[in-house]
Amino acid sequence: MPDTSDGRRKFLKTALISAGAVVGAVAARTMAYAKLTRDPLVREMENRSRNTSFGSHNEMAAALCPKASCNPGCDSGCSVGCQTSCKPGNK
Amino acid sequence: MNRAEARNTPPFARNAYPRLLAPWLLRDDGDNLLLYKCTYSELKYRVLSPVQALILPFFSGERSYGDIQAIWLHLTKPSHKAESLGELDELVRNLTAPDKVIGLTGAASDSFKDKAKIPLPDFGNYRWPAERTGVPVSVLVAPTNRCVAQCRYCYAERKLDEELTCAEWIGIFDQFAELSIRIVDLAGADPFMRADVFDLLRAMVERDFTFSVSTKSHISPAWARRLAELGIGRDQPGATDRGVQVSVDSANNQLASWLTGVNNYLDRARSTTANLIAAGLNPRIKCVLTPYNWEEAGQIVELFSSLGARRFQFVQYGRSIYRHSDDLFLTREQKLRLSESLPRLAAKRGDLEIVFQDETGEVRTGEQIKAAWEQRPICTGGRAALYVLPNGDVSLCEQLPHAPEHVVGNLLRESLLEIWNGAALDKFIHPDRSKFEGTACRACPEFEPCHWGRGYCYRDSLTAFGSVYDAPPGCPRQEKIPLRLI
């Protein structure tokens, strides 16, 4: 009969490493999750957003619209009345 | 890296610690969360969408981007995680450029100074998109309309109103501070015309307002030291931005005096600048370009940089409602030549900050006019900003005449919030069609989204057509020929 002990050892080693990696990954994820939920700001935001859905792609697209940031034409000193044609005050 | 690759690359490494940068601030605006740039030099703000409001308060610099990604997934509970993380990346990327709201280097935002008071959204009543802010982001105050000069190009009305006392102004400043208004800039004429100017300035500094003082008065060494003690005009990275500006229109004393109506104006401005610099301040030199001085930008920069000035601003004359003269308009040829020479000057003097208005008076096609109109930024008057006149009257814009039809309240009789949420202001920014009889707006199908949504420039309408109740010259539906504005 062929000696398979070496093959078995290799198989066991691989299985142990894999299991260790899985356990390690689960432990890391659990620790990361624990860290995340320990964060008081996360808990506060979770409470505040409990009944809010953030899944809407339309809302996301609108949120990313550059026009949400205003006044590109008024970078040279005008504080009020900001239009692209807004002139900096003559004084 | 091409654009598509850039889009697929997260804006920060998972182990990087991105943060909201100064001078950006978060503000709990009642029904939503507001992000704004706390500086007097430009008004930039946005009412955050719910997803932005959800994640931005975590950018304090204490959490890695990997942590923030995990928080995002935890809070949004998406069905497709990879896609959702891509959306977070996109959201954050839009805040890293061009406005540098979030970054890895630079002073952090003051919003996280007090961990117990980080502004957070109330999702129960979240209002977004919002046509206007819950409280003004910026208020312009004019303690006086008096000025030592009589500049030929001045845009200000200069009506000699009764002036509030220092104590009355301080009461008003207290209201602003209680409402977390930090941008309280100085407008009107020259604050140094008031004997109590330093009391006013001190009160503004004590409330941590960001503002700039513009003057044509002569600033003595003692006054310059007092400004320095208050931190006005001093470069302090991470500190509240407060500037000082000296107007200079010519490197020729005779011409400078003629333009400003002040004898020996150039000598006075040189002395002022030298005194400010000796006190450790960094004044901005501002020049209004007209056909009389348009070729002098280089000489002004040379003369004042030799005194130590490092910041310069050149703007083109624009029609004043009150003291206009056509000979002050730059010609097309002059504008074109400035469009070449000013960038060259800025490049040559890379050691200085030289900003200028690049307006060439180019004739635009119908398509260009339409595109420009559609992309116009909102008018902030009554939507995010207000103007307080010397007697406490409140209007929407510093360039509207001080007349009853433009006044929406008075801060001696009403609180700022009463005015902000009052009927007069509401009526001004939501005008009825009947006010636009005989104009392109009267039957316009876009009337509501235009007037009630983004608004338009009241000053341009008034200056070009004599009424705020008319379409501004930039509107593609405006058929009347406007008065030239710039």
Image (cartoon, coloured by chain):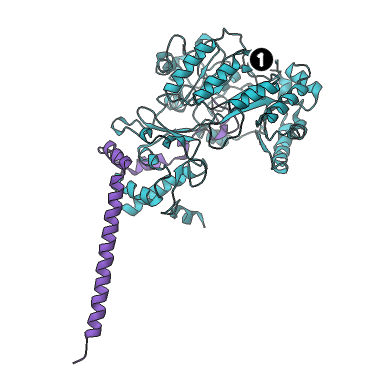
Left or right, B436 with reference to B289: left
Subunit of mark 1? Answer: B
Where disc 1 sits, the SS reads: loop
Q: Residue furthest bottom?
A: A1
Residue drawn at x 40%, y 35% is B48
Left or right, B350 with reference to B461: right
Q: Which chain is cyan?
A: B
Left or right, B297 with reference to B83: right
Left or right, B355 with reference to A32: right
Q: Amino acid at mark 1?
A: Cys
Q: Is residue B320 visible?
A: yes
Identify which residue, B465 or B91, lies in the foreground. B91
Q: Is residue B190 visible?
A: no
Residue B8 image-quadrant placement: bottom left
Check the picture and name the quadrant holding the C terminus of chain B: top right
Q: Position of residue B87 (x, y in %)?
A: 38, 48
Residue drawn at x 51%, y 9% is B404
> In the rendered picture, chain A carries what hue?
purple
Q: Residue furthest top?
A: B162
Q: Position of residue B482 (x, y in %)?
A: 61, 22
Identify which residue, B151 or B460, lies in the foreground. B151
Q: Position of residue B385 (x, y in %)?
A: 49, 23
Whether residue B186 is situated above or below residue B412 in the rendered picture:
below
Residue B149 image-quadrant placement: top right
Residue bearing the label numbered 1? B147
Identify which residue, B311 or A34, lies in the foreground. A34
Q: Position of residue A17 (x, y in %)?
A: 27, 71
Whether residue B60 is situated above or below residue B131 in the rendered picture:
below
